[in-house]
Amino acid sequence: GALVVYIPLWLLSSQGDAFHLEASSPWMLGAIPFLLGVGIYLWCAWQFTFAGRGTPAPIDPPKHLVTRGLYRVVRNPIYVGVSAALIGEALLFHELRLALYAALVFVFFHLWVVLVEEPLLRQKFGASYQDYCAQVPRWIPHLPIWQRKRSSVN
């Protein structure tokens, strides 16, 4: 909520400018990545709760490695979803400050994943996480292995 709602709202209102959306504007296409990003986050939170037996919150992380759903096509779909939502907001409001904020958030996500999260997951889940990393890319989604194998046979 803070990353996608409160900070962008603060950035939009920090200059004292009134911000608004024009429903007829081509910038309304920003609603697509915004809604997609929110949907991705919600789906992943569901997966963390029921498959991982935890939450996206660092105070209650999943107890089991989640490799189903969107986690079959990219290792960090929550971060991808949040980044998409932020890009959508930058487009919706046609606001450079939000685009720069989205870029900074993604850089933070990348550094966090590489320097903190992945080493912790390697330590917690061992070989199963190593195998998962070998099969699923960190940021750019791909077809799950079973779909690639099936399509190469046809």
Image (cartoon, rainbow, N blue to C red):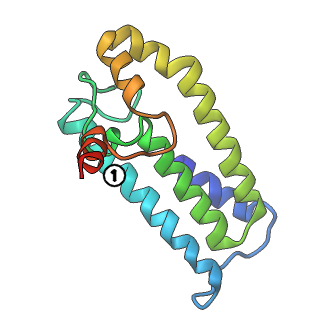
User: Element under label 1?
Assistant: helix
Which residue is label 1 attached to? 42
Q: Residue at x 28, y 25 (%)?
A: 65
Q: Residue at x 58, y 54 (%)?
A: 6
Q: Quadrant of residue 104?
A: top right
The spot of residue 67 in percent (x, y) is 28, 33
Q: Say if 78 sits above or below 88 in the image.
A: above
Q: Residue at x 18, y 38 (%)?
A: 50
Q: Residue furthest right?
A: 15
Q: Residue furthest front?
A: 154
Q: Along the line of sight, which residue is nearer the eye, 136 or 152?
A: 152
Q: Say if 90 sits above or below 26 in the image.
A: above
Q: Along the line of sight, which residue is nearer the eye, 72 or 51?
A: 72
Tell me which amino acid carries mark 1. Leu
Q: Along the line of sight, which residue is nearer the eye, 42 or 77?
A: 77
Q: Say if 84 sits above or below 55 in the image.
A: below
On the question of residue 1 being in view, the answer is no
Q: Residues within 10 Å of mark 1 (few under 14, many from 20)?
A: some
Q: Residue at x 75, y 52 (%)?
A: 100
The spot of residue 150 in percent (x, y) is 23, 46
Q: Residue furthest left?
A: 50
Q: From the viewer's perspective, is 55 left or right of 142?
A: left
